[in-house]
Amino acid sequence: MGLLLVAVVLGLVEGITEFLPVSSTGHLIIAGHLLEFRGPRAATFEIFIQLGAILAVVGLERRRFLGLLRSSPGAGFSGLRGCGLLAVTTAPALIAGYLLHDLIKERLFGPLPVALALFLGGIAILLAERYRPVARIPDIDSIGWRQAVVIGLSQCLALWPGVSRSGATIVGGLLCRLDRRTAATYSFLAAVPTMAAATLYDLFASRGVLVADDVLPLAIGFLVSFVAAWAAVRSFVAMLGRYTLRPFAWYRIAVAPMVWWLVT
């Protein structure tokens, strides 16, 4: 299959799954196997197209991010307070990721760990939906420091590929009494600094893998990922106004054995 078509497919997979609680890593493993696009070059390609998904959230939530630039201390999720909340949520995963980066790459990127994370993550979502406390935080501006810390610690679980960063942070938000839409929206906002730092670090570490002929496929994958993530995030937030996360949990449980079966 031509590299341009591979770029389109991987861009779609990345954009659609990155911010849904289904694990983009697991889906990219399946896509890479079916497309026969694997190895260091494929891994670097997948890292790059994540930037498209990140910028989609920046575009969708631009008012929120611009609000963080206010010079006043701010109220709610804005100004220095908003920046502080994001910093508290982001710091645990960045520190843990930096310290454990090589170990994670070596031990947890195989098909069995990813499949197991998909399955256990699905079970965790079902349990969270069944036993979560009554929601008392209806919007982003009502999030406090305790919620930011808990969601940040939850995000560390996503260092295990297959857990899903959005899945971990949304479940963490539900357990902190955020309603589903607020938990999802804060998950998207918190994803930007975390994913941007991790993506840029990985790109720098693998800068020698790509060649000049990869520029056009990378650009196409980046653009497709951006558009797909934009559509997926908007649809997901709208859906959470009417439905629970249970369909995503059952989907994860069904996909987990597929990852193991296809790759081994």
Image (cartoon, rainbow, N blue to C red):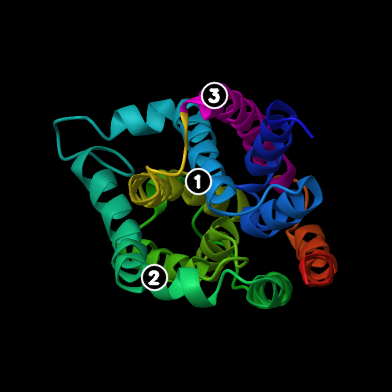
**Label 3: which residue?**
219
- The chief SS type of the magenta part is helix
Q: Position of residue 149 (x, y in %)?
A: 34, 67
52 and 247: which is toward the camera:
52
Q: Considering only vertical position in the picture, is 260 above or below 84?
A: below
Query: Which class describes the residues within 10 Å of circle 1: few (<14), some (14-19), or many (20+)?
Result: many
| Label whose residue precedes the other's in the sequence (2 or 3) | 2
Picture quadrant of residue 121: bottom right
Q: Which residue is drawn at the image coordinates 62% and 57% (left, top)?
A: 25
Q: Specify the amino acid type for callout 2.
A: Asp
Say which mark, if any, is on residue 102.
2
Tell me the distance, in whole angstroms, between the alpha carbons under discs 2 and 3: 28 Å
At horizontal 53% and vertical 59% (from top left) the residue drawn is 165
Note whether 94 is above or below 42 in the view shown: below
**Which span of residues is magenta-colored?**
212-240
Q: Which residue is mark 1?
A: 44
The answer, for residue 235, to whether it is visible in the render is: no
Residue 209 position, x and y percent, is 45, 44
Q: Residue 66 in the image: state x and y as whole percent.
A: 32, 27
Asked if residue 193 is among those painted magenta in the image, a careful observer would answer no
Q: Amino acid at mark 3?
A: Ala
Question: Quarter holding the C terminus?
Answer: bottom right
